[in-house]
Amino acid sequence: MVVTLCFLYLFVFIGGVRYRYYLLILGVFVPIGVIALLHLLRQHTRPIRMDRSLRIAACGGYLAVLLAAGNCLYYMEKPDAYYPQIQFAKIMAETPNATLLNYGFLDGGFHLMSNAPLPESDFFCKLNIPREHLPLMYEEQERLITEAATDYIVLRWEMQETMEERYRFADLYQNYQLLAVTNEVHDAYCYALFVRIQ
């Protein structure tokens, strides 16, 4: 189990990029750790009798902690207009069969919300792989921008940055025009939607 855990951790984080949800895959080892901990406690303490009400309370407490520690609580009861994906999908709906490039970051659900067909490219979004390890991905995204191959482009950057600091590819600003900018405060990202200049 320890070897499996170590190798899984290594392969998840070997790229040097870390997002909060990356740890979720390691959650499969939590019950095993809890069982081992309870087994150790049983060996060194008197047995604890758990009647039905205590078991229900323990499960309820676990679920309450899980909900409080989760990333999703913030999003409950948010209106549709809060989400950048929905805001941009409404704008893109004005263009029939609009195509979209998710430039410079992982797919953030923008294709799904807008029903945009994927560009005829393997790299419609940027994966968490540095340029020196997969230059083709970066070159392909830049080619799509240079050729103005998609109707729309969506960008994302961290709030402490500016868009111009993060995205310096000149063809972006020559071939596309900024349509909308929005923030997602909880994850501390800004998003921009560009449209192809006709």
Image: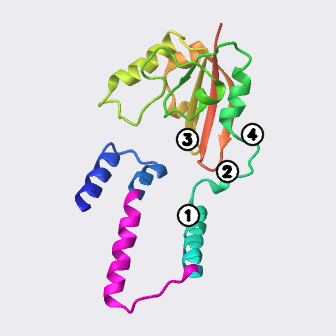
Q: Earlier in the sequence, mark 1 or mark 4?
A: 1
Mark toward the viewer: 1 or 4: 1
Q: Earlier in the sequence, mark 4 or mark 2?
A: 2
Q: Which residue is mark 3?
A: 161
Q: Amino acid at mark 1?
A: Leu
Give residue 161's quadrant in the image: top right
- 3D distance between C-alphas at marks 2 and 1: 15 Å
The image's mark for residue 66 is 1
- Range covered by the magenta-colored residues: 28-52
Q: Position of residue 5 (x, y in %)?
A: 29, 57
**Which residue corresponds to the image point at 35% horizontal and 85% vertical from the top-left?**
42
Q: Earlier in the sequence, mark 3 or mark 4?
A: 4
The image's mark for residue 75 is 2
**Which residue corresponds to the image point at 56% horizontal and 14% vertical from the top-left?**
150
Mark toward the viewer: 3 or 4: 4
- 3D distance between C-alphas at marks 1 and 3: 32 Å
Q: Amino acid at mark 4?
A: Asp
- Depth check: 76 or 169 in front? 76
Q: Position of residue 68 (x, y in %)?
A: 60, 64
Please state if 130 lies on the left or on the right of 94 as rendered.
left
- 3D distance between C-alphas at marks 3 and 4: 26 Å
Q: Which residue is mark 4?
A: 80
